Image (cartoon, grey):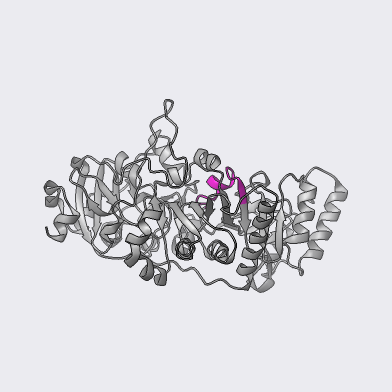
Amino acid sequence: MTQLETRIRNAALRDRVVSADAAARLIHDGMVVGMSGFTRAGEAKAVPMALAERAKTDPLKITLMTGASLGNDLDKTLAEAHVLSRRIPFMSDPALRRAINAGEVMYVDQHLSETVEMLRTRQIPGVDVAVIEAVAITETGGIVPTTSVGNSASFALLADKVIVEINLNQPAELEGLHDIFIPTYRPNRMPIPVVSPESRVGLPFIPVPPEKIAAIVITEKLDSSSTILDPDDETRAIAGHLTDFFLNEVRQGRLDNSLAPLQAGIGTIANAVLHGLIDSPFHDLKMYSEVLQDSTFDLMAAGKMSFASGSSITLSAAKYAEVLPRLAEFKPKLILRPQEISNHPEVVRRLGLICINTALEFDIYGNVNSTHVMGTQMMNGIGGSGDFARNAYLSVFVTKSIAKGGAISSVVPMVSHVDHTEHDVDILVTEQGLADLRGLAPRERAKVILANCVHPDWCPALADYLARAEARGGHTPHLLEEALSWHVRLRDTGKMA
């Protein structure tokens, strides 16, 4: 068989191979388009670029839904081509961020477990066209995803038409890695039968009727690599504080040396924290998360992690070069699921996850801002952090205590935007230390946070604020006229002090 025959095993579908330009012509002004892609992995690559090029002479606007952020600068390209009228449910691209903050693109920031639930129940407009990157199409027309699942399965099943991008440079060994399980409709929905990270409960492909596939595009462009930085002194200190905390939980009999299934958000700090577990006494670790990053494979290579379930694989360039040639070796230890399953609140609660996510800032009572700079400027979407934080066995948020060379304290009197309330936060960690907030009232929380998480340069000001607020009284004491004064000074002078 030729490579094309191997990748498109349904012979009748081979006649539907067209150029990216021709496929993009199936997308019209005003449509809702669902595209594959989850945190720079497995996104459709050729059709969105063709759509942006077409918009130069044939302007159009679409609502774009994905799993999470797109790689290969696709969000940037589509934003600068003015193709996007609405974007759902996650983004992190600077160019798109500017368009959102200018009001040019209406951005709907959603918990990542919710998007396809709203589609399925017609609470938001349905998908007209789905564009899905695949490693192969099976004999029955099933679509085999590449390095992410995200929302691709439900987009393909719910869309009127499906465009498939067959990426010849995505390794064929990816087939068999995926576990596509779609919940049944309410009110007669059966429980999701995932009882451990290793549970396989679905199909290794997206079961789409062949007649629904309107076009197939052949591509060869690889995923973008992640921009994760190496651990530094601060992130190593955060990892150390968290490791010490886990060791104490083991001593107290609340955990054992395999801990509990781990979830970690995307980014340098969360990746560094997991990386720090390599030199810990913990072993036989398992992961039930969204994004499998460099640290996942480092922990496996070190013999520390035995299994990882996620919705995408997003790696640095060096780690891609190491992992992809060894995919057959790692494959028995991996599953990629739809994000509504990887992030499902009931599954997260039942498996008892330890969830580690990143904060932009948090306040003295434990409220966390993950998304907005100065309360108004969108930085990046909330992603899945809310899905995990509210339902975790342990909900952990990490950040460095200062930013911009010390001009900004990451611990403030009151956060300028709340993504995770104090009710959903158990543990806060900076390089200064760890605050265990479990079972504490707001006044107690504030004292623990000040004693453990705040940079020394900012402790006196926060202590003064808290003392004067407590004198005013209240269950959660605040000086309303001063609560956001640090942010006002930052806006006016470039620093909080």
474 or 491: nearer the viewer: 474
Seen in the image, is 472 located left or right of residue 36?
right
Q: Residue at x 42, y 65 (%)?
A: 315
> Would residue 114 be found to the left or right of residue 208 on screen?
right
Identify the residue shown where x is 62% and y is 62%. Answer: 399
Residue located 73% across and 63% down the image: 454
Q: Residue furthest right?
A: 471
Q: Is residue 191 above or below residue 427?
A: above
Q: Give the range drawn in magenta.
A: 382-395
Q: Is residue 470 in view?
A: yes
Res. 482 in view? no
Taking the image as shown, residue 266 lies to the left or right of residue 17, namely right
Specify whether residue 386 is painted magenta.
Answer: yes
Q: Where does residue 14 sit, x and y in percent of width and height?
A: 13, 52
Q: Position of residue 231 (x, y in %)?
A: 56, 71
Residue shown at 48%/65% (left/top)? Answer: 302
Q: Is 232 within the magenta?
A: no
9 up-or-down from 50: above or below? above
Picture quadrant where residue 283 is located: bottom right
Q: In which quarter of the image is residue 403?
A: bottom right
Given residues 311 and 401, the one toward you in this image is: 311
Q: Position of residue 200 (x, y in %)?
A: 38, 43
- Give the quarter of the figure containing the N terminus: bottom left
